[in-house]
Amino acid sequence: MKNILYILFFLALWACNKDGKSSENTQDGMTALIDKVTESNGGGEGCFVPYQPKVCELIDVQTIARILGVQASDIEEEGDASLMLHKLGKNKDKPYKGSKYNSCEYKWTDPSGKTFNKKMPMIGDMEMRIGGFVTVGCIAAVKDIEQFKFYHRPVTQAELDKANKSANKEMDKRASEGKNTKSEAEIGKSIIPSLSEGMDIQYVEGVGEIATRTYSTMSMDGVDLTVYQNKNHFSVNVTMDTKSKEENLAMAKKIALEILKKCK
C-alpha cells in the first residue's frame, strides 16, 4: 500500500499548479519522492535496465501499428522528454535517480478526422478526435518476484481509503512546513479521491513470470500492464478510443510479449 500512497501523493503534488508551473519547493518534493520510490526497489540490473535511456528501442513503430491494427505512418513516436514524471522529477544539478520512469509514447490519430463524445474525469463531456496512445517503459530492477508482488498486487478499498487519508495528511504536513502553500495543498487534497477512484489491480496470466493490470476511473478504458521478468519490470499502457478495457488489455499483452523477446 505504501507504493500507492507515493503515487497518489506525487500526482496530487504535481496537480497543485494547474498552469503546469511548479514552485521550487514542489519540484524538490517531486524529486525526493521519485528518489524514495526508486531506492525502494533495488535488485540486480537484469536485461531490461540497459534500455532505460533508450526505451524507444524496446519495440518499433511497425510492430505497434500491426498490433493496434492501424497504419504506421499515422503514429507519432516521442521519447522520454515528454513524460510528465521524468520532466518534472529531474533535478539537473545532481545525478538523476528517476530514470526508471523513462517511457516512449506512440500516439495515433484517426486519419479520417472522425470525432466522438468522450467523458473526461474531473472535466466532463468533450468532443474529441478519435485516437489513442501506447506508452512503454518504466523499467526498474526488482530484487525478486516477492518484492514485485509486494508493490504490485490487488488492493482492497480499505487500503485505498487508508492511502487517501495518508496522502491528505502528507499534503497538510508539507503546507505546515512551508514546502507547499495552503492553496496548493488544498488543490492536491481535492483531487486525491479522483486519483484512486475505481482503481482495480489484478494479476494476469500469459505474460512474463508474473504481471498485473490496473484499471481506474481516471484512465477510463485504458489499461496499465506491469510485467516482471528476470528481476526487472516494465510497463505497457494502452488507451485506444472506442476500444473496451478488455480489448486494450489484449493489445497491451501482445505488445508486452514482443518486448519480452528482448530478454530471452
Image (cartoon, grey):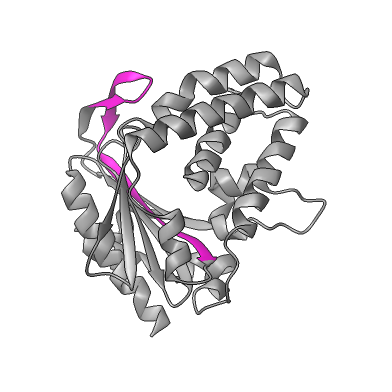
Instruction: Indicate left or right for 236 with 34 as reference.
Output: left
Specify the quadrant that holds the C terminus. bottom left
Question: Dividing the picture into quarters, in which one does residue 185 lie?
Answer: top right
The x and y percentages for residue 139 are: 50, 64
- The image quarter containing residue 16 is top right
- Choose between 42 and 260: the one closer to the eye: 42
The image position of residue 58, as x and y in percent, is 43, 70
Q: Is residue 236 visible?
A: yes
54 above or below 112? below
Q: Could one spot residue 59 in this view of the protein?
A: no
Tell me the magenta residue range. 118-140
Above or below, comparing residue 42 to residue 167 in the picture: below
Residue located 78% across and 22% down the image? 178
Instruction: Indicate the position of residue 125 as horizontal and vertical percent values.
Output: 27, 19
Instruction: Tell me where residue 192 appears, x and y as whole percent.
Output: 47, 26
Q: Nearer the viewer, residue 76 or 185?
A: 185
Tell me the residue at 81%/55% (across/down). 94
Query: Quick check: 97 above or below 83?
Result: below
* Secondary structure, magenta segment, majority class: strand
**Is residue 34 found left or right of 181 in the rendered image?**
left
Asked whether, in this view, residue 261 is left or right of residue 11, the answer is left
Q: Is residue 51 left or right of residue 118?
A: right
Identity of the residue furthest to the bottom in this view: 264
Count of marks, rendered view: 0
User: Which quadrant holds residue 256?
Assistant: bottom left
Q: Going 66% across and 28% down the picture, which residue do you hit? A: 21
Residue at the image position 54 percent from the left and 48 percent from the top: 83
User: Magenta segment: does it hold 178?
Assistant: no
Give the vertical position of 25 relative to 231 (above or below).
Answer: above
